[in-house]
Amino acid sequence: MVGSANLNIMIKAARRAGRALVKDFREVENLQVSMKGAGDFVSRADINAERIIKEDLMGARPTYGWLAEEGGGEEGQDPTRRWIVDPLDGTTNFLHGLPHWAISIALEHKGQVVAGVVFDPAKDEMFFAEKGTGAWMNDSRLRVSGRTKMIESIFATGLPFGGRADLPDTLKDLGRILPGCAGVRRWGAAALDLAYVAAGRYDGFWERRLNAWDIAAGLIIVREAGGFAESITPSGDILSDGTIVCANEPLFAPFAKLVRG
């Protein structure tokens, strides 16, 4: 699949940052790790990956705005376009030597995500999509799962850690969802959770208290693969609310109903 110039820039940046992260991942024990908050780590690798991505994206499109996990936000000369970047989603997995983490890069135009890339360097899986052109993983077209029964479906979520206040809500969610499905997975990287819904590996995903950079790229990949996604607050905006529930068309209504309680 041949993408636009912007998509090709995004893929190239993700691959370059991915090479650096894989090199650091092999020496994970030696990383200089600083605390960024309870249970939430930032590493030298994380900051270096963001620097590489920013060099590539802003070098190619210097007028665009910028929003990223480590570096924060910057207004661009072009107020309609903005890069939204998580240089390392799944930092805790990375620091524990678990090969499940990703680079997430999205392009927003006039408040809508129009292109997204989620790259898993450890498995060499590049998930990407552009508005109106479908979703892909490497050379394969992606489609959400075809399952229609909740009891046959598995769902992904994130679980609160380090004393976060949303633990009671999440435990209530699990109490409603687990009895009616084939399982719930918590693999620790929201960008990959969304990519896996797009690929049909998970049948759906929900989570609260996310940031725009966690979900922007995965959101367009899910939608271009035929998935439905909404904020957990039914009339809310996913990126500004930081909540999401998504699934294929037949499962979306019953799944969202359980999530929303």
Image (cartoon, helix red, strand yellow):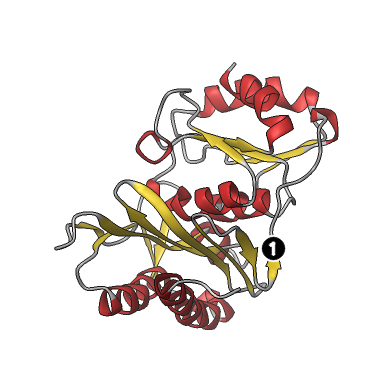
Q: Residue furthest front?
A: 132
Q: Quadrant of the N terminus?
A: bottom right
Residue 58 visible in this rendered orientation of the protein: yes
Q: Amino acid at mark 1?
A: Arg
| Residue hosting label 1 | 141
Where, by quadrant of the figure, is residue 76 drawn?
A: bottom left
Asked which secondary structure carries label 1, the reply is strand
Residue 44's spot in the image, x, y percent?
38, 73
Viewer-side residue, 157 vs 32: 157
Q: Is 122 located above or below residue 218 in the figure?
A: below
Residue 49's spot in the image, x, y percent?
40, 74
Q: Is 148 located above or below residue 52 in the figure?
A: above
Q: Residue at x 79, y 29 (%)?
A: 150
Viewer-side residue, 131 vs 201: 131
Where, by quadrant of the figure, is residue 199 drawn?
A: bottom right
Q: Residue at x 61, y 59 (%)?
A: 135
Residue 219's spot in the image, x, y percent?
51, 48
Q: Is 80 located above or below residue 171 in the figure?
A: below
